[in-house]
Amino acid sequence: MSEKHVFKSELQQILNLITHSLYSHKEIFLRELISNASDAIDKIRFNSLQNDPLLEGDRDWKIRLVVDKEARTLTVSDNGIGMDHDALVENLGTIAKSGTKAFLESLKQADAAAKPGLIGQFGVGFYSAFMVADKVTVISRPAGAQGAMKWESDGLGEFTVDPAERAGRGTDVVLHLKEEEKEFLAEYRLRSIVKQFSDFIEHPVVIDADKGEGKTEEETLNSRKALWLRSKVDVTPEEHEAFYKQISDDYDAPAKVIHYAAEGTLEFKALLYIPKRKSWDLQFAEPKVGPRLYINRVQIMDHCEALLPPYLRFVKGVVDCSDLPLNVSRELLQHNPLLEKIQKSLVKNVFQALNDLRASEPETYEGVFKELGPFLKEGLARDFANREQICDLLLVGSLKTEAGRTTTLAQYVEAMPEGQQDIYFLTGEDRAVLEHVPALEAFRHRGWDVLLLTDPIDAFVFPTLPDYKGRAFKAADRHQPELDPEEKKKEEEAAEAYKPLLGLLKGLIGGLKDVRLTRRLKESASCLTSDEDAMDPHMERLLQKLGQGAGPRERVLELNPDHPVVKGLLEIHAKDMTDPRIEAYGRLLHDQALLAEGSRLADPTGFVKRLNDLLLKDALRS
Ligand SMILES: Nc1ncnc2c1ncn2[C@@H]1O[C@H](COP(=O)(O)OP(=O)(O)OP(=O)(O)O)[C@@H](O)[C@H]1O
């Protein structure tokens, strides 16, 4: 009796999506199956580098398409690594790949128009077979084993596993095509799909081609071109696009191609692509970092992490190095000085390519930066040696750019007026709120620009940046522009006059580190600041949201001595130190400052009451 299993629930949902939502591009099932077959061949070839007998003499790598018109089946066969009972059960039924859950969640939340795009991004792999088949049979025999196993399912919820027969190592995926999918039995159709989607697969994809009069002849359908080995000028943009799509599952062309051959002490070929947008695994799954590693055309690893730092995980491609020994172990590859050198070169070239793109196609670059900028910013925190280069690539909004427009740091520094030494920035959730933060008034007044940073990662990264082109980064809400001598004198005089009032307010309001006068305000009466070494208030709010924030921190309330309300308060205090309006107005000034920076009021009811008292007085007066 057959051994019965049920699909894992996430897989059932995926299968449901595949059969009910994926109507377009059904032909990609063949790309997925050929790609799995090719991976299986790479695996056995790699293992055999250290254990040759494993191959039992069969090293004629091949992916074979077999059509049976009468039975209405299409079979994709390989002589790859094969699967035993447990591998079949786990790989094809019980384990959904990492990120599936997160992907399904976001799919639920996406609006209807965005859904097909999202589903399209998700690599459905083996299960795409159920787009065209109402039953799939997999017969597999692992390398080194005698017997084979058969896996079978109609994709509806269950699958069975039974012992079976197979001559030699490898896997046959037999698709029992649906009546309406008969087109996938036609040789011309299979030829064109392989050409379109699997042309660069390294191993031959063969079919017994019909030569007329009942004769057939084995024919290889894919060109197997290794683009990275060819000279740069010989590869057309169309070939790049097709190859990139094949290795990335992206449906769009890449934003930029990086293709070069390093010569000299270290020889390698690199063909890398910068995508236009982030792939689904960057959003939902544990991303696969690093390009493929080949040694003289033999694929060693699908993703070689040692070749690129994690923050450049959006880069796809291939590196082929002839200087590495073929039988190198994966562990050794992790800390290999040769790979470290290659990484340095790749990183340099990625930066160069992004810079070129920024200069030659600014609009494309803006789109790419919107998608991939947060990854690059991670590099600011992790890759100190390349900070300056990463800073060169940043696009940031500022007080002087229109909403939605950006500037580069180089442009910002270039435009700094005389007297401005440092780069000022402010982080927050929303540009519209940031624009009105009172602490910016003095900057506006002087004509100094301030970077307005609204990407969540900005609050973590910018406060840690030391400088760019010798200009220090300073938070605009904690550092004010230097005062000129006249302003300084005025401030000292005012400080003397206001001292008793400020001391009283500190006691009355409570919870404040200090109450001071400020010159950073021009229009507003008050603002809240922190000491220069304190945490960025936006970062603090973010950490509190994540449940990692410390308790509320003591802030400094700053008052503008030129503002009529503050002057009025000084007069009230001079007449009667015990006037209750001192506390009420002081608290209003404090709450105003909180609202202006986008923070929450600790006592909204008290605020409303005090405001209403004022409104009432005004109403009674008129
Ligand atoms: N022809 C095959 N030979 C050996 N193992 C296979 C074969 N086809 C599939 N598998 C195994 O089944 C697993 C699941 O395959 P599936 O196509 O669903 O996902 P994947 O290939 O891992 O991911 P993706 O489709 O995103 O590349 C593979 O990782 C592999 O271990």
Image (cartoon, rainbow, N blue to C red):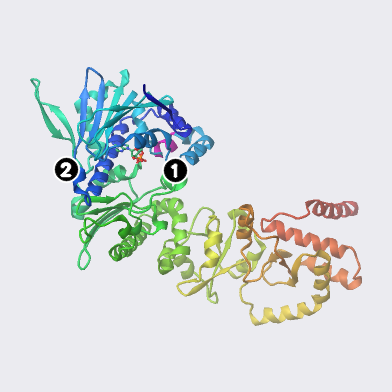
Q: For the point 29% across and 35% down, which residue is it?
A: 33
Q: Position of residue 99 (x, y in %)?
A: 46, 42
423 in relation to 125, above or below: below
Q: Quick check: 28 left or right of 539? A: left
- Cα–Cα gap, marks 2 and 1: 33 Å
Q: Quick check: 106 left or right of 47? A: right
Mark 2 element type = loop
132 in relation to 341, above or below: above
Mark 1 element type = loop
583 in relation to 48, above or below: below
Give the labeled residue for mark 2: 59
User: 302 and 313: which one is in front?
Assistant: 302
Locate the N terminus and report the quarter of the image it occupies: top left
Q: Disc 2 marks which amino acid?
A: Arg
Total residue callouts: 2
Q: Position of residue 98 (x, y in %)?
A: 44, 43
Instruction: Decide whether residue 120 is among the magenta residues.
Output: yes
Does the Cβ of the disc 2 residue fall within 8 Å of ligand 1? Answer: no
Identify the mark at residue 7; answer none if there is no mark. none
Identify the mark at residue 98; answer none if there is no mark. 1
Ligand 1 shows up in the quarter that is top left
Between disc 2 and disc 1, whose residue precedes? Answer: 2
Q: Quick check: 575 left or right of 363? A: right
User: 297 and 602: which one is in front?
Assistant: 297
What's the magenta region?
Answer: 116-121
Are the two marked residues, 2 and 1, in contact with CB atoms closer than 8 angstroms?
A: no
Q: Position of residue 280 (x, y in %)?
A: 43, 43
Classified by dominant secondary structure, the portion drawn in magenta counts as: helix
Does the Cβ of the disc 1 residue fall within 8 Å of ligand 1? Answer: no
Q: Disc 1 marks which amino acid?
A: Ser
Q: Is residue 398 visible?
A: no
